[in-house]
Amino acid sequence: MERYARLSMGTVFGHFMERITSMRFTSAKEKYNHFQETYSKIYHRIPLGMVASYLGITQETLSRIRAKK
């Protein structure tokens, strides 16, 4: 049980580190593109306010990014 918990926590920690790095060092457009690739099956069903909040950007910025595509 301890080994399973340690391995799963290692995976969760890795995802958190990737998310923190992404939040700090990528542009809003790159964040949105990565979000679309990662959640390609469901991203169109999620309200834009929630997507913007998840990406750490404003709704206005998200709207501008989506308009340029």
Image (spheres, rainbow, N blue to C red):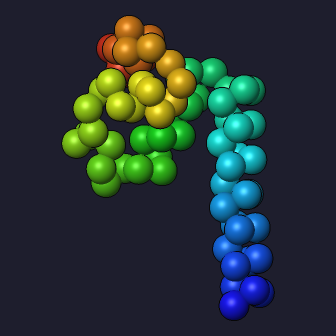
Query: In the rendered view, would you say 12 is above or below 43?
Result: below
Q: Quadrant of the N terminus?
A: bottom right
Q: Residue at the location (48% across, 50% down)?
A: 38
Query: In the rendered view, would you say 54 is above or below 57?
Result: below
Decide if residue 8 is on the left or right side of residue 63.
Answer: right
- Of residue 25 and residue 6, the one placed in the foreground of this image is 6
Decide if residue 36 is on the left or right side of residue 44.
Answer: right
Q: Residue at the location (53% across, 24% down)?
A: 56
Residue at the far left: name it. 45
- The quadrant in which residue 62 appears is top left
Query: In the rendered view, would you say 35 is above or below 57?
Result: below
Residue at the far front: name it. 2
- In the rendered image, residue 29, in percent from the top left (x then y), is placed at 53, 23
Decide if residue 13 is on the left or right side of residue 37.
Answer: right
**Residue 35 can be seen, yes or no:** yes
- In the rendered image, residue 51, in percent from the top left (x then y), is placed at 39, 32
- The quadrant in which residue 46 appears is top left
- In the rendered image, residue 21, in percent from the top left (x then y), is placed at 74, 37
Query: Total marks drawn?
Result: 0
- The quadrant in which residue 50 appears is top left
Q: Quadrant of the C terminus?
A: top left
Q: Residue at the location (30% across, 27% down)?
A: 48
**Residue 64 can be seen, yes or no:** no
